[in-house]
Image (cartoon, rainbow, N blue to C red):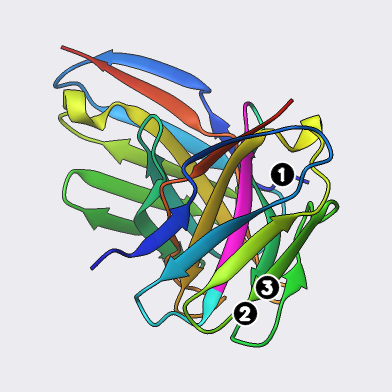
Amino acid sequence: SQQGEEDPQALSIQEGENATMNCSYKTSINNLQWYRQNSGRGLVHLILIRSNEREKHSGRLRVTLDTSKKSSSLLITASRAADTASYFCATEGLRQGAQKLVFGQGTRLTINP
Amino acid sequence: NAGVTQTPKFQVLKTGQSMTLQCAQDMNHNSMYWYRQDPGMGLRLIYYSASEGTTDKGEVPNGYNVSRLNKREFSLRLESAAPSQTSVYFCASSFRVSGNTIYFGEGSWLTVV
């Protein structure tokens, strides 16, 4: 069963604007990760946030985690055309033996020049 | 530094044929994974190998077999391909199964006719 659910499924914004994507999950987690996938390519890791962390930054990326609401958000500031991609959240569950990341279906982000 | 390399990139099979997808990583990672990605389904784990000498089923193992040939290599075999196995397959690796970034290959596009 899918653990992470991204919202929205698709997002189209103008270059320079901020993009926010959300991820909700159902069960307790060890960590939550965000990945980017360019069309026709493999997934690239962006950020890992642990269950005891609330916010992490990496360049223009900001990830928040609210374990009480079982949700996370990924904010991309000052978007660029190169940010056009699909973004996936993935959760590592507490009692799965930590063997598996469960991926959501992704948010397809389009940055218009 | 190639990261995760998988072959072939593209393959067309007839129903009932067999084939093996090859994967190698040069990051000295302990854990390796095979995922499939279908439209609207996100990534689903087929099999994983937590460490050299071990393999375990993931979410969708039916119709597949794997071999962890050594620490570097993890192959996925389709013994009798079915149209339902038409998908994009990703090999991935991480230092260990828990709490680590996963590094993905570029994908193998498989069509079964």
Tell me if residue B109 can be seen.
yes
Q: In this view, does B68 lie above or below B23?
A: below
How far apart, in angstroms, are the residues tagged by discs 3 and 2? 12 Å
| Point 40% across, 62% down: residue | B4
* Both marks 1 and 3 on one chain: no
Chain assignment, label 1: A
| Point 64% across, 35% down: residue | B87
Find out whether residue A44 is within the magenta segment.
no
Looking at the rendered structure, the secondary structure element under dot 2 is: loop
Identify which residue, B51 or A66, lies in the foreground.
B51
Foreground tag (1 vs 2): 2
Find out whether residue B38 is within the magenta segment.
yes
State left or right for residue A56 relative to residue B18.
left
Q: In which quarter of the image is the C terminus of chain A?
A: top left
How far apart, in angstroms, are the residues tagged by discs 1 and 3? 26 Å
How far apart, in angstroms, are the residues tagged by discs 1 and 2? 22 Å
Please give the residue where the numbered disc 3 appears in the rendered image. B67
Please give the residue where the numbered disc 2 appears in the rendered image. B50
Q: In this view, does A52 lie above or below A111?
A: below
Chain assignment, label 2: B
Chain assignment, label 3: B
Looking at the rendered structure, the secondary structure element under dot 1 is: loop
Dot 2 amino acid type: Ala
Foreground tag (1 vs 3): 3
Dot 1 amino acid type: Gln
Q: What crowding class fits label 2: few (fewer than 14 Cα within 10 Å), some (14-19), or many (20 or more)?
A: many
Looking at the rendered structure, the secondary structure element under dot 3 is: strand
State left or right for residue B99 relative to residue B76.
left
Please give the residue where the numbered disc 1 appears in the rendered image. A2
What are the residue bounds of the magenta stretch?
B32-39
Dot 3 amino acid type: Ser
